Structure formats: C-alpha cells, structure tokens
Image: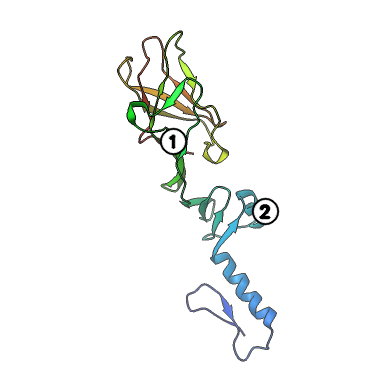
Amino acid sequence: MPLTDPYGQQVPYPTLSDTPNAQSGFEGVVKALTPKVVMTFASASVRGGTLVTPVEGMVTWLKDVNLLQLYDGSQWVTIAAGTQNWVTTPLASGWSHNGNNNGEWQYRVVNLFGEPTIMFRGAIYKNSWSGTVAGDYVLTSVDLPGWARPSTLRTINVPCSDAGSTRISLKLDIQTDGKLHLYGTGTNDKPQWIGFNGTFCSL
C-alpha cells in the first residue's frame, strides 16, 4: 500500500511490498504533484476550461497577461506580475511629450496590493492653444492594449501648470475602450504642461 509524503501534502509513493506497476506508481505522484506546482496556461479562459473546479491553494501563471495568481477558495487573486517595461503613450495630434522636462508620458501595468494596476510617469504639453479651446481632449492616437484597460471607467486627478491656467489639476478618464480622456481645459485653463508622475489606478 503506497505511503504519503511526510509534509502532509498527500503525495503518494510506492513501498517495496507493493505490486510493481510503473504506470500506477508514477500516475499517483503526477496527479498529486501537478495541482501543487505553478501551472501555466495561455489565458484565464483556457485555465477555466481546464480547472473546472479549482482547489484552494492552486497557483497558476497566465502567459497572455504575465500574472501569477492564487485560488483563495472563491476566486483567483493576483499575487505577482511579470516585469512590465514602460511603454510610451502614443499621443494624439497637437500634443508632445516631455512637458516641463519630466520625460515622455509612459505607462506600465504592475501588481499592487494584489491587483493589476496601471502606473504613469512623465508629462506632456499642447503644441498650441490657439483658436477655440475645448473642455476635453482624447490624448491618445492609439487605444491602450487590452491588458492595460480597466474593467470599469477609472478617473484620476493629474497635476498641471498654473501658468496659463486657473487650475493646478485636471481630470483624466481611463476608459474601458483604452482611450485616455482629459477634462478641465478651457478659455482660462490652458496649462503649459500636464504631469503624470506618481499617478496610478487599479484595473
């Protein structure tokens, strides 16, 4: 009769008195160990189709979003994110990077307190405020990729120059379709730069 490991993980191994059966012996070990190692899946949907009834304590790596997740008994929780390089935000026409010498406006997705989080850095400026000044602008020429989009609309405050503006902050909407939408500009609010250092929100 097979015995189990001394760590209480219920991994079986055959004894000398067991009838020799290589398939049965290895199968028991494989089935017991596989749920206890980090399992790799192409995506959450593939994982869901394979682990129909996950067990508390299972850990998986999702290749499409570079996330390490743990099943806590009721849901999959992110416990770590793979290294995400900073990506330069593609700007809409009329806007430029490096406002106030703060570098290019960039983003990346990291794991913060167990949640995928988008972080920003850098600053931008408008090439010219001539003509009619709109109250809002879509700042991106290309939408954020799917892995960087929030599940619902996220709104954050971003600082801006008080030179040329009666305000020192504006509103940035991070939309579910990947657009970055700025609000708060106007006839009396034409800041020389708009910053993003230290801004972030959960996805």
Spot the residue most to the bottom. 17
Residue sitting at the far left:
163
Is disc 2 placed on a helix, strand or loop? helix
- x and y, in percent, of residue 3 in the image: 56, 82
Dot 1 or dot 2, earlier in sequence: 2
Q: Nearer the viewer, residue 57 or 191?
A: 191
Identify the residue at horizontal 52%, vertical 39% (top origin): 148
Give the image quarter of residue 202.
Answer: top left
Badge 1: how crowded within 10 Å, few (<14), some, or many (20+)? some
At horizontal 59% and vertical 67% (from top left) the residue drawn is: 34
Q: CA distance from mark 1 to mark 2?
A: 35 Å
Q: Which residue is mark 2?
A: 49
Res. 58 mark: none
Q: What coloring was used for the rendering?
A: rainbow
Q: Label 1's element?
A: strand
Q: Are marks 1 and 2 in contact (CB under 8 Å)?
A: no
User: Mark 2 belongs to which amino acid?
Assistant: Gly
Across and down, in percent, residue 24 comes to: 68, 79
Residue 121, image quadrant: top left
Q: Which mark is residue 106?
A: 1
- Left or right of 9 on screen, residue 26: right
Taking 81 as reference, is 182 above or below it?
A: above
Which amino acid is tagged 1? Gln
